[in-house]
Each structure stands twice: as C-alpha cells, then as structure tokens.
Image: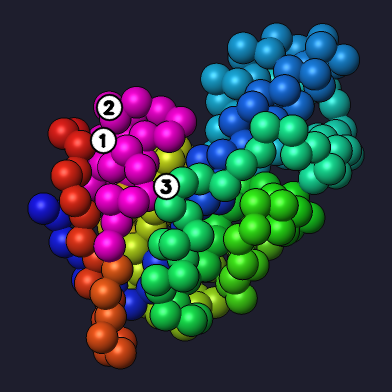
Amino acid sequence: MPTFVCSAILFDLDGVLVDSTRAVDREWRDWGRRKGVDGDAIMAIAHGVRTIEVIRRVAPHLDAEREARKIENHEAHDHVGVVVMPGALDLVRSIPEGRWGVVTSGSRLLARARLRFCGLPIPKVLVTADDVTHGKPHPEPYLKGAERLGFNSTDCLVIEDAPAGIESARSGGMKVIGITSTYRAESVQHAEAVIGKLAQIQVSSNGSEKMKIEISASLPQ
C-alpha cells in the first residue's frame, strides 16, 4: 500500500474534486460549432489546459483572450451535469486547515462557482488561470500553489486526473497521485500512485507538521 509524507496537498479541480466532464464537453462543442472548429479536435487537447491556450491552438485567427472570457463566463453559470466527486468533501475535511489548496486551469470565477455549487469549501489558496503566465503542463501553477501555502514544492503532494497536470506538478518537484476519473490508468502512469476514487486516500496528521497519506488498493500502473 503506497504511503506518502507531505506538509500540504494541492488538488486539481475538474475531474478531481468536481465532475464537470459533461459541462466542459458541452460548452466546448457548442463553441466549436459556432466558430467552425471541430469538436473532437478541441476535446483532444482541452482537459487540464487553460481555455485561452486551447483557443490559441485550435483557432489562432480568433481573439483568444476575448473568446476565453466569454466561454468561462458562460461556463460559470452552466451547472447542468456538474456534481461533486464522491469522497471529495470528506477528504478535504480530513486535512488540517491551511494545508490544502486548489490549482486549476479554469478562471477564478469558474472555479469559485463550481466549488460553491458542489458544496465544497473555497480554500484560502486557489490558483487559477488568472494567476499564472504559463498554464499546465508548465510547473508555474503548482509552484505558485506551494508558495502561497508557504511550503517547499517538494513538501507538497498533488492529486491530478490529467497528463498536463501531472507533468506540471512533477516538473515542480512534487509527487502526484493520479485519479482515473477522466483518463485511463495508462494516461496517468507517470504519477507515483494511481487510484480510481478519492475514498482510497486516507490522511492522518496527529497534530504534526507532516501528514501521512495512505493509499488503499492502488491501481496497477
């Protein structure tokens, strides 16, 4: 059974704490139809990447900043099919206060809307697309999360569902637990452990600076 020792935990949002797959797919495909961009081409690269960067890749002729703002403003009010991931609330409640945060490729408006809608607490540290120059897979987002929590990156554990996020965290010197909520296990194989559900993660701290993270029945990588 894999065990990790860390000072803090950083979560991705969509696909980890919140299941927004249906909403994300719907919003991107609707946008693609309006702009004449193939929906499958968009979805092949969209997950875990900032909206503005997806647009720059699939529609470089458009004003990416303007389009990204419109998409995410609309997404922030589209909660159809958005649900909390099983075990998410219990997991964040098991972590000592000030020792966890969220690092997402979405905007602050979107992240706060989804957390609130799903009944999850909004952490003091919330790093969004608005806070970084370089999105995932660049290490900047997770490095900024560790910095804002006040810990060295090597003392932080990351929970991610997307290859871009795993690369971002590992490039920043962090260990990663991958969850197969969005991709198959082989797509998150570069994580130190792979799980199928958040309930497999058990956190204990005993009041110390370090937390012990135990994984039950890690999936084969």
> How far is disc 1 from disc 2 in space, using C-alphas?
5 Å
Tag 1–tag 3 contact (CB < 8 Å) = no
The earlier-in-sequence mark between 1 and 3 is: 3
Report crowding for label 3: few under 14, some 14 to 19, many 20 or more residues within 10 A (C-alpha): many
> How far is disc 2 from disc 3 in space, using C-alphas?
14 Å
Task: State which quadrant residue 215 falls in.
Answer: bottom left
- What residue would you read off at disc 2? 186
Residue 192: in magenta span = yes
Q: Which mark is residue 189?
A: 1
Percent across and percent down for residue 54 are: 66, 31
The amino acid pointed to by label 1 is Gln
- What residue would you read off at disc 3? 160
Residue at 76% x, 27% y: name it: 27
> How far is disc 1 from disc 3 in space, using C-alphas?
11 Å
The amino acid pointed to by label 3 is Glu
Of residues 67 and 182, which is closer to you in this image? 182
Horizontal relation, residue 34 to residue 3: left or right? right
Percent across and percent down for residue 202 are: 27, 62
Horizontal relation, residue 5 to residue 161: left or right? left
Tag 1–tag 2 contact (CB < 8 Å) = yes
Of residues 50 and 72, which is closer to you in this image? 72
